[in-house]
Amino acid sequence: MAAIHDESFFRWDGNILVVNILGKPGASKDAVGKPKGAQLKVNVTAPPRNGRATDHMVAFLAPLFGVRERDIEVVFGRESIHKQLRIAKPGRWPEVFGPWAGPKASATAKSGQSCPI
């Protein structure tokens, strides 16, 4: 049987949230957009040079998930708009992800609030 989020922009690997990103460097502001297919749009103001936009993206996303920058691993796409991030034990759940759907989904958390991990 297929998992609920097989066609989604995110999935769980134990307590690690795996997110597929469609990045837009050089944007007018840092922002998390809407999902586009199996990727989440994320705009960052940093220029697309030598992975700086990805580093900036990680720094921007860390507080949104309630983690430290070092808790976000760039699996691939450091110098590409197509990326995959692994976020260890997120403590927050941005609204774009919808209702809490973590590895322990029986406990609930409201969007943008602490997660029960």
Image (cartoon, rainbow, N blue to C red):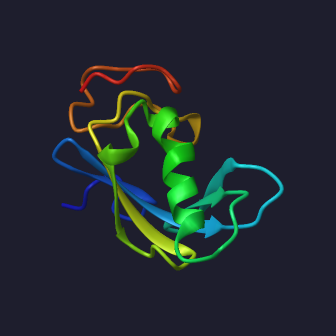
Residue at x 28%, y 22% (from the top left corner): 116
Of the 4 image quadrants, the one containing the N terminus is bottom left
Of the 4 image quadrants, the one containing the C terminus is top left
Residue 39 shows up from this direction: no
Residue at x 21%, y 31% (from the top left corner): 104
Where residue 108 appears, x then y in whole percent?
A: 35, 20
Residue 107 shows up from this direction: yes
Where residue 41 appears, x then y in whole percent?
A: 62, 60
Where residue 64 appears, x then y in whole percent?
A: 52, 35
Residue 9 drawn above or below residue 100: below
43 sits to left or right of 17: right
Residue 106 drawn above or below residue 53: above
Residue at x 57%, y 75% (from the top left corner): 81
Residue 66 drawn above or below residue 6: above
Instruction: Work out whether residue 57 or residue 4 is closer to the camera in this orientation and state it.
Output: 57
Instruction: Work out whether residue 19 or residue 100 is closer to the camera in this orientation and state it.
Output: 19
Residue at x 53%, y 79% (from the top left corner): 80
47 sits to left or right of 20: right
Quadrant housing residue 27: bottom right
